[in-house]
Amino acid sequence: MAVEKARFLAREVWQHRSLVLTLAGRAIKARYAGSVLGLAWAVLEPLLQFGLYLLVFGVFLGLRGFAGGGTAFALWLLAGLVPFLLLQEGWVRAAGVFRAQAGLVKHVPVPLSALLVSELLAVLARHAVLVFLFVLVATVAGQAHLAGVPFLLMGLGLSLLLLVGGGLFLSVAGTYIPDVAPVTSTAMSLALYLTPILYPAHLVPPQLRRFLWVNPLFGLAETFRGFVGSVPAWPPVLATVVLSLILALAARSLFLRREKRLRDLV
């Protein structure tokens, strides 16, 4: 039954793929509508954010000597930020997607899964640019390793699984409770500093370090860092795989059970 439901959900999105692509394109254009630089902000915004973190943690806090220093540290830092920024934006937008598109939800017989996927696809398109730049810079700088490609592919797969799983759950929760979107935004801001993404794990107090494996954001960052030569901590990586699958399965089941009810709540 669970497999049949999963196939039904995927088939539903595929049948409305034209609408999904149209809505995703509209979401991307709407984000930068009226700005002088337009879609260029899709690249500039995350790069400026990355530059700020690199300045603060690499220069001001003196961590640039970690992971080989220089370009190696910058890529190590970027490897942790790439998946985190994707999930941060994707989850926050998913939490408010049905309320933001209440007109379509109430008056157009379009599957809610298609609306959600279009929103997540718009986020993916924007962050795919950052992933491409990360791979390109790592390759040009000689920091990318062929042996690390499986880690990169694993990281991309886990990112998609967490994005969709978290998006399904938060889209339901955000429809029931409007405060879920700002709470998610605040929680992710806190998670950035509570997770060894901007700083190495050995700086975490030993009594707390033992709990890092239950944080999927840390395991996800470790997989991306395997691409640039860092040796991943396997317990967090394996835990992230398990937690991602559990989240995706549980969120899908919740979404399918509540989908009809959601239209009456927006």
Image: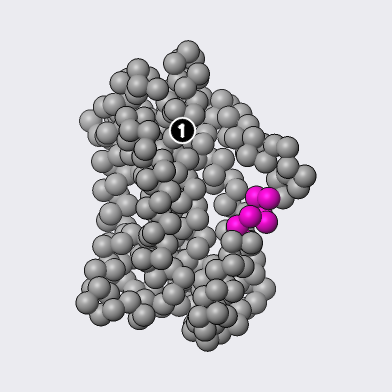
Q: Quarter of the image containing the N terminus?
A: top left
In depth, the one of 249 and 215 nearer the eye is 215
Q: Residue 261, can we see it?
A: yes
Range of the magenta residues?
A: 41-47
> Residue 101, position in %: x, y?
50, 25
Q: Main secondary structure of the magenta part?
A: helix
Q: Quarter of the image containing the C terminus?
A: top left
Residue 196, image quadrant = bottom left
Q: Residues within 10 Å of mark 1 (few under 14, many from 20)?
A: many
Q: Residue at x 70, y 45 (%)?
A: 39
Say whether residue 43 is magenta.
yes
Amino acid residing under circle 1: Val
Q: Residue at x 26, y 48 (%)?
A: 246
Q: Residue at x 27, y 33 (%)?
A: 254
> Residue 215, position in %: x, y?
31, 62
In depth, the one of 134 and 149 nearer the eye is 134
Q: Residue at x 61, y 67 (%)?
A: 51
In depth, the one of 239 and 263 nearer the eye is 263
Residue 256 higher or lower than 135, as above or below? above
Q: Residue 227, can we see it?
A: no
Element at label 1? helix
Left or right? Give the position of 187 relative to 76: left
Say whether residue 243 is magenta.
no
Residue 247 higher or lower than 81, as above or below? above
Q: As drawn, which residue projects farthest toward the right?
A: 36
Residue 64, image quadrant = bottom right
> Residue 56, position in %: x, y?
55, 74
**Total residue callouts:** 1
> In the rendered image, which residue does mark 1 sit on?
97
